[in-house]
Amino acid sequence: MVAVEVEKSDKSEVVAVEIVDQSKQKMSWLGYFWDTADLPPEERWLLFKVDASLLIFASLGYFLKNLDQSNINNAFLSGMKEDLGMYGNELVTATSIWTVGYVIGQIPSNLLLTRVSPRWVIPGLEIGWGLATLGNYAVKDIRALYALRFLVGFFESGFYPGIHYILGCWYTPRELSKRSYIFWVTGNLGSMFSGFLQSAAYTNLDGVNGHEGWRWLFIIDAVITLPIAVFGLTMLPALPWYAKPTFWLSEKEIEIARARMKKIGRNGAEPWSWPKLRRFLTSWHFWILPMLYVIWNNSGIQNPMGYWLKSFNSNPPPVPGWSFTVSQINLLPLPGNAISVVNSLAWAWIADGPAGGRRWPFIYANAVLTIIFAAVLLKFPIYQDVKGHFVLYYMSSLCGAAGPMILNWIGEISTADNEARAILVAMGNDFAYVVQAVAPNFVWKTTDFPAAHKGMTWSIVVSSLLIGWNSLVLFMVKRDERKKRDNPVEDDVIVGDEESTDRKDAELFGSEEQLGELKKVAV
């Protein structure tokens, strides 16, 4: 444990803050379960407050985001296909159009978060996507659906990369994966809940007030968005380096948060300059790190289970004696989501605990599992051993859990430059969806399901590339670590020829004048 002195924003006194060096601390059994157990009381209370505001809002918001994304597929399987005449690749096209809207807003939104308080940016976007989602219930043709899916994608764009950036502003490497995975798995819970919700809507609301069951799904989704947005407007804190005391966080707690970030070398906001921009654009971080997430995001298997279940109702049936109701088609895939949730949380706790904050082993594990399951699904005839296919589809949910780990790693590698961290996290997610807007039209065609041979082959190839790219990033990180050991004053991201290598508090978190300007727009 070390004592860190931090100047208060009014310069009236110096506050002594005791911060635990978690990288050197031996964790207790309770600390492995929840990391705050090993922290001093004041630091523990700070994290409780941040968890109770930021983490709860992030989890609820991402639940809704994935509920919406799953709703379009569940609605398609529950009557929208027939009502809107979606007999070709219209579902893939609608998803691609959503992705276009999603791509446009991500990087600007994350840059905005470095200057404006998250409680204005993120809830504002959430209100927008709630209204756009509501509009989906009233669509009468495919063109209206396309327009609304674009708007939903645009308003959702800032949420996922923005929350990952914000989490990185409050939590250390021994705390970050647990929070980012709790946030992430609520998306899986949203996908699971969508199946229950669609089944209930189809059974109980179909025809109520003249609306089909699948239309009610969008109405319900939109209605539950508003109170969560209000919660965010009330409770989301500003980032530590320009936060002001509120009813929720005191001056002392804000100083503790700043000291924690300083301890791990995570810097505050800096003004943009040409030297800073030049360093960013010429660093290997800019060219290599975002691609790690792009490759991962497009390597996953698009689970064909729903299409497979629906195909048993064809006439003539592919397997005589087997058929599934609409409710079964929505509910039977859900155990796979549960497996994904348990697996993801296990990875998060291992990464923050026994793995000591290492992220790269889990990226390798993700790639290897995807290759194995995609190869089996590619070769195993889809109507042979029906019960065995249920098990195979469920277990394939073990793939694809490395996403938050990769964004954590990107943020931690670029921790010294606040703006670079915000941009790189957004770039990874943004460019991933650029590829995702195009690739499914060729390799994951709706008409190719449930076999999806091209898609399974694509997953094998891209997962192999993920292994190679992860190795490249690991090599570059180790190279930088060696350079720092040999030349401790060098920093190839922050320090250039034009700037001093002696970075004091004002350089780490911005000068008082710079922070004062930020506070005017951020709080």
Image (spheres, rainbow, N blue to C red):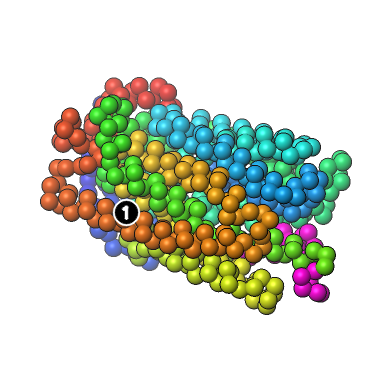
> In this view of the protein, which residue sits in the foreground, 53 or 423?
423
Quarter where residue 124 is shown: top right
Q: Which residue is mark 1?
A: 473
Q: Amino acid at mark 1?
A: Val
Whether residue 34 is visible here, answered yes or no, is no
Name above or below for residue 514 compared with residue 445.
above
Tell me where the magenta segment starts and ends, as one range. Answer: 317-336
Residue at coordinates 34% horizontally, 38% vertically from top-left?
420
> In this view of the protein, which residue sits in the foreground, 193 or 280?
280
Give the crowd class for mark 1: few <14, some 14-19, many >=20 residues within 10 Å.
many
Percent from the top left, x then y, of residue 185?
Answer: 54, 55
Name above or below for residue 158 compared with residue 203.
above
Percent from the top left, x then y, of residue 15?
Answer: 26, 36
The local secondary structure at tag 1 comes to helix
In the rendered image, residue 329 lying in the magenta stretch gets the answer: yes
Q: Say whether residue 77 is left or right of residue 448.
A: right
> In this view of the protein, which residue sits in the foreground, 368 or 416?
368
Quarter where residue 417 is shown: top left
Residue at coordinates 68% horizontally, 43% vertically from top-left?
221
Image quarter (top left, top right, bottom left or bottom right) of the C terminus = top left
Percent from the top left, x then y, of residue 345?
Answer: 48, 61
Residue at coordinates 12% horizontally, 51% vertically from top-left?
486
Percent from the top left, x then y, of residue 71?
Answer: 68, 48
